Image: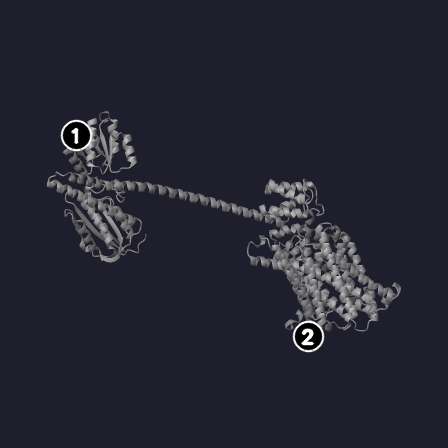
Amino acid sequence: MTILNTLVAVSLGYVVLLFLIAFAADRIAQTGRGRWLRSPVVYTLSLSVYCTAWTFFGAVGYAARSGLEYLTIYLGPTLVLVGWWWLLRKLVRIGRSQRITSIADLISSRFGKSNSLAVIVTLAAVIGTTPYIALQLQSITLAVSAFTGSVVNGADEVVNAPDSRSVALLVATGLSIFTILFGTRNLDANERHHGVVIAIAVEAVVKLMALVAVGAYVTWGLSGGVGPMLARIDASVIGRWEVDPGRWMGLTFVAGAAFLCLPRMFQVLVVENSDEAHLRTASWAFPLYMILMSLFVVPIAVVGLEIMPEGANPDLFVVTLPLSQGRDGLALFSFIGGFSAATSMVIVAAIALSTMVSNHVVMPIWLRLQGPGASVSGDVRHVVLVSRRLSIAGVVFLGYLYFRLSGGGTALAAIGLISFVGVSQFLPALVGGLFWRGATRPGAIAGLLGGFGLWLYTLLLPNLAAQTALEQSLLLSGPFGIGWLRPQALFGIGGIDPLVHAMIWSLLVNVTLFLTISLLTFPTPLERLQGAQFVNVFEHSGNPRSWSRGGAESEDLLVMAQRIIGPSEAQQIFQAEAGRQGLSGFLPETTPDFIERLERELSGSVGAATAHAMVAQIVGRASVSVEDLLAVADETAQMMEYSSQLEAKSSELARTARQLRTANEKLTQLSRQKDAFLSQISHELRTPMTSIRAFSEILRDGGLDPDDQTRYSNVIHGEALRLTRLLDDLLDLSVLENGQVNLNLQEGRLDVTLDHAIASASAASGKLRIRRDKTQEGITIFTDLDRLSQVFINLIANARKYCDAARPELRISVHRTGGTLTVDFIDNGAGIPSDKHGVIFEKFARVTSDQSAGGAGLGLAICREIMGRLGGSVAYLPGQTGAAFRVTLPLRAGPATS
Amino acid sequence: MGKEVLLIEDEPNIIEAISFILSRDGWRVHSHANGVDAADVVRMRKPDVVILDVMLPGRSGYDILEELRSDAATRSLPVMLLTARGQTKDREMAERLGATRFMSKPFSNAEVLETVRTLAAEA
């Protein structure tokens, strides 16, 4: 048990050391003095996340089971680095110029910023990587179990043993914490993580040294040198393994593809790359690293097979071999090497996947839930961080879950290869997108879905099925007994290696769909532009290393800033920055920090996209991307819309002004009418009052004969009545005009109403003769009978007053048409002159000069108002024998409309 | 005395009242109720004093006054303007057109009589 305690202590110490290294690197990077953190050597070492626990432990196991085939895993990447140098350079250049954050981001960017494509790639990457993470956890628990000595041969019991579960959980938790701490420390625009990369580089050295140490021990310590070692290899079964050319070629290809497409490889290869030139170093240094890693695999496997008991797990030879020889220290070192390999893979994979999950799945959903406006609010950074952290924990624990559920029965190498084939499905879209402008989004989606679906069916499903007897029938006889659909022998083509079978089918379908559908569909404008940017990246972007840091650049920025935010404010910003940099009085250096701040300031005035595009053009940090241009266009469109809105508003304003002017004119006119009306009323009131005053003074003077006295008293009385009538009429008209009148609607007979009106109007004088046709008048009406009667009285009284015929006569005739009733009042006088027809219904519009007629000139105005209220009208009928008025009204008056 | 007052007014009751007041004082009163030919009547009758209503049928009292003042024969004829619209602007209008006196309705009988006497004496 002491060795186990030591193991725990050493592991913890190692983890603490990694924490410290990562922490220090982050601090140094913050101060800006850490250029060595980004050296080609560090870059090369960081690429070693390719060599996971699978390579560390599994390669030996692989060699023990399948001979030299494990070399294909190294061969693929080597070929890519050496032979596909141009492809890598293009990838890195695009990644930097387009600010790519992950492989999902790259593929979606290339095909018109399609988020559906990004989601597909993200999900595929998570599905493909989860078993891989499980594999790392499994290898660590297996290695730990080797130290406890409990079980060495079978993996099943180990995984299910409670203490190894807790080991795996502990490791998963620790890795999550480490990754969250150093992977999401801040939101770098370029997604670079200095601390993590340095820690990975250190782990790369440790795992190489550990493997070399074990190999050296085996070769020189156990076999006595290189010569005897070679002899031992020749004698071993490994040397006699037959090479299967199909499988070799397939595996080499898949390894090369995975080297490009694995999310964690994309992370270190493209995203964390700080200088294109580092690729040149890596292209020879990393193959060298891999050669060193693989150098002692065969010796360890050969010696392990010889020395270790039958049935011992060859995957653990690296640890168990030194342990069996009592070399505990070496075993510990070896364990730490494997631990390094496992942890570095999980950390980088978690960062890469969390970026993808957060950027393409969580954030779009969050933004949609937030509704419009969320993308411009300030706390998005915080949300992104939280989302990244949750995604990291999610990804790692998904791996842990898979580890628990799968039972860990499969050999390490098998899981790794399944993952490799899965992620290599990205290759057609990736390479096609980089070199073929005709590639389209539907093509990429179809290829990815087809290839990945087949991968699930032909490789992942059988792998899962192998652990549950239930599914065996599927493999043997196909789904629903359909033989040609057997996952490992599609269309009856069996007999080949399942892995190669799956690889050929999935990639064949993938590429075919990608090409065919791309040819059949047309790229959208954005796709076309992005395609051009990607395919011709070297023409579009300047060499990213040639940032000029001269004063000219700073001056240009100042000039531009002045144009946008005004001279004083711009100079203030630049002076403040110069002060901060210790360059008071001079122009500040265009540090990335400063440029970012400036961009933020400018975006406040012209919008983020425009600001970015303008700054980028001067700094030359990146070519103006299509997205930038489109965003500018978008902003311009918004401004145009805004200006057209303004235009609409101004025309609306003009319309309102016109309406106001009309209303004003109307008011002025009304005011003039009111003045005229008041003046008229004054006149109408003063005239009778004049008579009253004059005669009352005469009466007061006395000395009159009784006849005169009576006559003058009668004048006063008559004028007083006239005044009262005038006031009554005025009030009546006022009420009618203001619409405050309450109609007393009731049923009644027209002839009765006419009888009443004639009686009232003719009471004073019987001189006017009325002619009626009573047979026409027996009509029942529903209206305000009193008001109607008032109109009739007015019209009859007018005839009585103004009809100048020798024998005045008024003819009243009634007609009924449908629901409408007309009552005509026609006298035999001279009538009203035609030039007065228009004004007789106006207030005080007296036609004759005869003041004694007694009316105030309000009668017809009142009639017009009343008939309006009753839903009818009163009008003058020209062309009759005398004055003629026609009253029109509905048989049934509706509710009063005001 | 036998001096004549020409009353140009269309309201019968007012004609009767003024006629009574002036006759009682010994004036001859002639009344005319139409505005259209009022100026001609003035020129024909050559009264000592004219009492002129503003609101007349056919022609406004202001028009008539204007015509009288533009005619040498009637330029200095005493004219008392009577109006039922006793606002300031009416008074100003009367003064501008050359009314000798301005009186708004209702008036005091004594005042009318006094004014006529004064105007006749000044003339």
Number of numbered discs present?
2
Residue placed under numbered mark 1 in the picture: B4
Q: Position of residue A771 (x, y in %)?
A: 17, 50
Residue A198 falls left or right of residue B8: right
Q: Nearer the viewer, residue A401 or B92?
A: B92
State whether discs 2 and 1 lie on one chain.
no
Q: CA distance from mark 2 to mark 1?
A: 145 Å
**Which colour scheme appears in the figure?**
one colour
Residue A473 falls left or right of residue A309: left
Q: Which mark is residue A695?
A: none
Q: Position of residue A70 (x, y in %)?
A: 78, 64
Mark 1 closeness class: few <14, some 14–19, many ≥20 residues within 10 Å: many
Q: Position of residue A400 (x, y in %)?
A: 68, 67
Q: Are marks 2 and 1 in contact (CB under 8 Å)?
A: no
- Tell me if residue A178 comes above or below residue B67 in the rendering: below
Q: Which chain is home to disc 1?
A: B
For the point 35% across and 41% down, the residue is A668
Q: Position of residue A851 (x, y in %)?
A: 20, 41
Q: Give the structural element (helix, strand or loop) at label 1.
A: strand
Q: Nearer the viewer, residue A69 or A780?
A: A780
The mark closer to the camera, 2 or 1, is: 1
- Tell me if residue B66 comes above or below residue A550 in the rendering: above
Which three-letter amino acid code belongs to the residue tagged 2? Ala
Q: Nearer the viewer, residue A883 or A483?
A: A883
- Can residue A298 be seen here? yes
Q: Which chain is home to disc 2?
A: A
Residue placed under numbered mark 2 in the picture: A469
Quadrant position of the N terminus of chain A in the picture: bottom right
Q: Give the structural element (helix, strand or loop) at label 2.
A: helix
